[in-house]
Amino acid sequence: MTHLLADLTACIGTELRAVEDRFHLELNSELRCVNTLVKHVSRFRGKMLRPMLVLLSGKAAGQTSDAHITLATVVEMVHMATLVHDDVLDEAELRRKGATINHLRGNEAAVLLGDYLISHSYHLCSSVDAAAHDLPAQYASRLIARTTNQVCEGELLQIDNRNNIDLDEKTYYQIISYKTASLCAACCSLGATFAGATPKQVKAMEQYGLSIGIAFQIQDDILDLIGDVDTVGKTLGIDIEKGKLTLPIIHFLQNAPLEHRQLLRSLLSDRDPDRAEKIRNLILPSQSIVYTRQAATQWIDSARQALQELPDSEPRQVLDTIAQFIINRPM
């Protein structure tokens, strides 16, 4: 996906390179130990999807400016902070085929690095002159702060529902809307707003971001359950080990034959070291994987429909292609 996106995003190539430069410049510390950790975590950045959303939304709705470069850098810092903290919460050892910060340097260093990234994102965001774009003072900072609050609320709600075998779809969607999709929605909203989009266009772009964020997380949950670690490039089976019920499991517990539901409940309560593989083998041939993929596809359809509010352009076409890529990630 990374190479394909690089080919598709030529229309924002200059801006993406500027974001790369700003990211490294802003996080350059006088302390060697900090720079070492930042350099390592930079390996996790990969696709730079969220900066792309800011820039493409801006170009699809109007024109980009230096504010877009700054905002794209800000959301990448926020995203990186959430990855570092997520790895601590999940006790993950692998991300993008490399060792996580917590595995390499311990939880203390990982937590503080995540805090460093998030605090610097606020510092950088405060430099955006919203008034120059006829927006209320600190518009971007307040939106970023509200979004990071939602990310934390989503994580707390997920923790509160660990090992809740009776978790329903409504609560599941609330969790992923907050912890994953809210940042994608903010990226698209900021990009369009600072390009001078109409309120209706901003709302449509926010819906696009929310929809692809939900679809992205659903697909990620499928990969965690039935993906291949060498292909996906990160530790798998974490959801089961941490007692996180995802959509395939929720659907299976509600719709599978009684004896299969009872077996899954037993496996979820068991501490068998092979239970992740047993659960995978139980759910894989069921209709629950099909159902979950269909759900992701419906959210992608919603995202693509939202794009119709913007005039046809190359950036809009790229956003449409990105939506399709999300549900076609390799297993």
Image (spheres, helix red, strand yellow):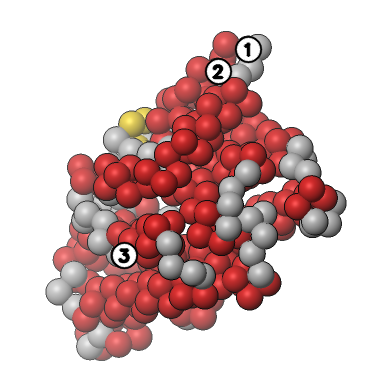
Counting from the top left corner in percent of width and height, residue 27 is at 61, 25
Do the residues bearing badges 2 and 1 touch, measured as CB atoms within 8 Å? yes
Q: Please give the residue where the numbered disc 2 appears in the rendered image.
A: 35
Name the foreground residue: 257 vs 196: 196
Disc on res. 324: 3
Name the foreground residue: 45 vs 233: 45
- At x 63%, y 75%, the residue is 200
Counting from the top left corner in percent of width and height, residue 11 is at 41, 46
Eyeballing the image, is 47 above or below 276? Answer: above
- At x 24%, y 65%, the residue is 279
Q: Regarding mark 3 in the picture, which secondary structure is present there?
A: helix
Q: Regarding mark 1 in the picture, which secondary structure is present there?
A: loop
Residue 115 visible to the viewer? no
Residue type pointed to by label 2:
Asn
Which is more N-terminal, label 1 or label 3? 1
Task: State the quadrant of the C terminus.
Answer: bottom left
Name the foreground residue: 63 vs 156: 63
Q: Regarding mark 2 in the picture, which secondary structure is present there?
A: helix
Counting from the top left corner in percent of width and height, residue 329 is at 26, 56
Mark-to-mark CA distance, 2 and 3: 36 Å
Counting from the top left corner in percent of width and height, residue 53 is at 50, 53
Disc on res. 239: none
Eyeballing the image, is 317 above or below 42? Answer: below
